[in-house]
């Protein structure tokens, strides 16, 4: 799914999912076998297989919900 990574008003990394009209802050970052995993405040885990740091925000990229 396409998602947008951006910096929230509080300065934290947030993820916006347009198809769900959902915006949540990232509460945890992990490194998985296939890429970076972000855990959102609502409990969702999203894997970003092609996310390379450093990245410029805002960034639209592909993610997979685990």
Image: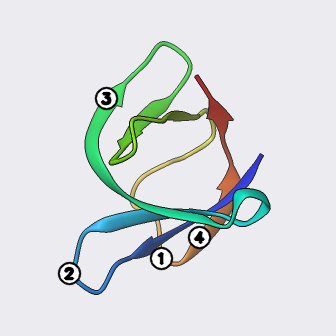
CB under 8 Å between discs 4 and 1? yes
> Quadrant where the N terminus lies?
top right
| Residue found at the very far bottom of the displayed protein | 9
Alpha-carbon distance for marks 3 and 1? 19 Å
Q: Residue at x 43, y 32 (%)?
A: 37
Q: Give the residue displayed 39% in from the left and 44% down from the top.
A: 42
Seen in the picture, residue 4 relative to 51 is either above or below; the reply is below
- State the CA–CA distance, disc 4 to disc 3: 19 Å
Q: Earlier in the sequence, mark 4 or mark 3?
A: 3
Tell me if residue 51 comes above or below residue 2 in the rendering: above
Q: How far is mark 2 from mark 4, CA to CA?
A: 18 Å
Front residue of this view, candidates 56 and 18: 18
Q: Secondary structure at mark 3?
A: strand
Location of mark 2 (residue): 10
Count of marks placed on residues = 4
Q: Are marks 2 and 3 in contact (CB under 8 Å)?
A: no
Asked whether the residues under the numbered discs 2 and 4 touch, taking CB atoms below 8 Å apart as contact, a structural biologist would say no
Nearer the observer: mark 2 or 3; the answer is 2
């Amino acid at each position: 799914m396409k998602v947008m990574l951006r910096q929230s008003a509080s300065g934290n990394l947030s993820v916006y999912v347009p198809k769900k009209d959902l915006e949540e802050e990232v509460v945890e970052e992990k490194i998985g076998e296939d890429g970076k995993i972000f855990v959102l405040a609502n409990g969702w885990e999203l894997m970003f297989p092609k996310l390379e740091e450093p990245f410029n925000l805002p960034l639209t990229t592909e993610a997979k919900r685990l």
